[in-house]
Amino acid sequence: MSIFSRMTDIINSNISSLLDKAENPEKMIRMVIQEMEETLVEVRSGTAKIIAERKTLARRAEHLNRQSADWEKKAELALTKNREDLAKAALVERSSISSTIEILAKDMAKLDETLDKLSNEIEQLQGKLNDARARQKTIVMRTRATQSRLDINMQLHNHTIDNAMDKFEYYEKQIDMMEGHMESVHVEQKGLQSEFDELARQEKIDQELEDLKSKLNR
């Protein structure tokens, strides 16, 4: 496949369609960009050669035009000297040169047409390349974000983490039970102390009552 055919295929291709079918869009668009960049380099190199060839043909045509004008002057000179035979020979040479000039003109016209098409296609390819580069940044960011989500999701469903969380819950329940037991002991101890405090209070009242009776019996 020639470089120009490949360039046409790339220009006519649909990047979105390629990415939709790709298992790895990031890798696919990297390959597409590389292909476009390589194609642009080759096409521009080929275009430079065509331009150089066009300039060569133009210089040759200019040289032949000078020769044609020179033969025409020679024909005129021969006629002024009554040398019609020389004038005719000079015109034959001029005619031959004119034929070559016409061929060169057609060749240059074809090259001009080719250069116009190449210029247009290079512009289109550059536009697609710019679009692909812009999409590459978006795809890379989306791919990395998606991978991060997948990693987090895998961690959330990791059995080791689940087991660790289960152990946390078990230990929390054990601590709750220990705290409950300590509170019940405290409540029990508090109740027992209350009973002793009540006995002491009653004993004090009884003593005060006896002291009061003794006082009245005097």
Image (cartoon, rainbow, N blue to C red):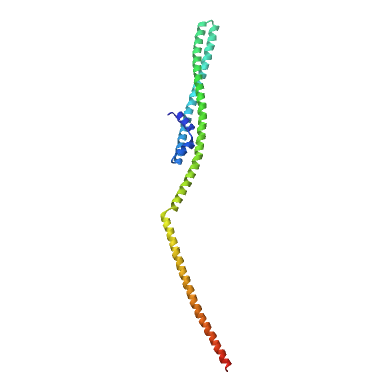
Give the vertical position of 169 relative to 198 (above or below): above
Query: Which residue is drawn at the image coordinates 50% and 39% (left, top)?
Result: 133
The C terminus lies in quadrant:
bottom right
Q: Quadrant of residue 21?
A: top left
Residue at the location (42% across, 60% down)? 167
Q: Is residue 88 visible?
A: yes
Q: Nearer the viewer, residue 194 or 83?
A: 194
Query: Observer-nearest residue: 13 or 115?
Result: 13
Q: Position of residue 201 (x, y in %)?
A: 53, 82
Q: Is residue 60 visible?
A: no
Q: Tell me the residue at 47%/39% (across/down).
A: 20
Q: Residue furthest bottom?
A: 218
Looking at the picture, does residue 138 appear above or below residue 163?
Answer: above
| Number of disc labels | 0
Q: Where does the N terminus fall, quadrant-wise?
A: top left
In the image, 125 versus 142, the foreground residue is: 142
Q: Position of residue 177 (x, y in %)?
A: 45, 67
Residue 137, compared with residue 187, is above or below; it is above
Position of residue 5 in the picture relative to residue 217 (left or right): left
Q: Residue 181's spot in the image, x, y percent?
A: 45, 70
Residue sitting at x 49%, y 15%:
99
Give the x, y percent position of residue 114: 50, 25
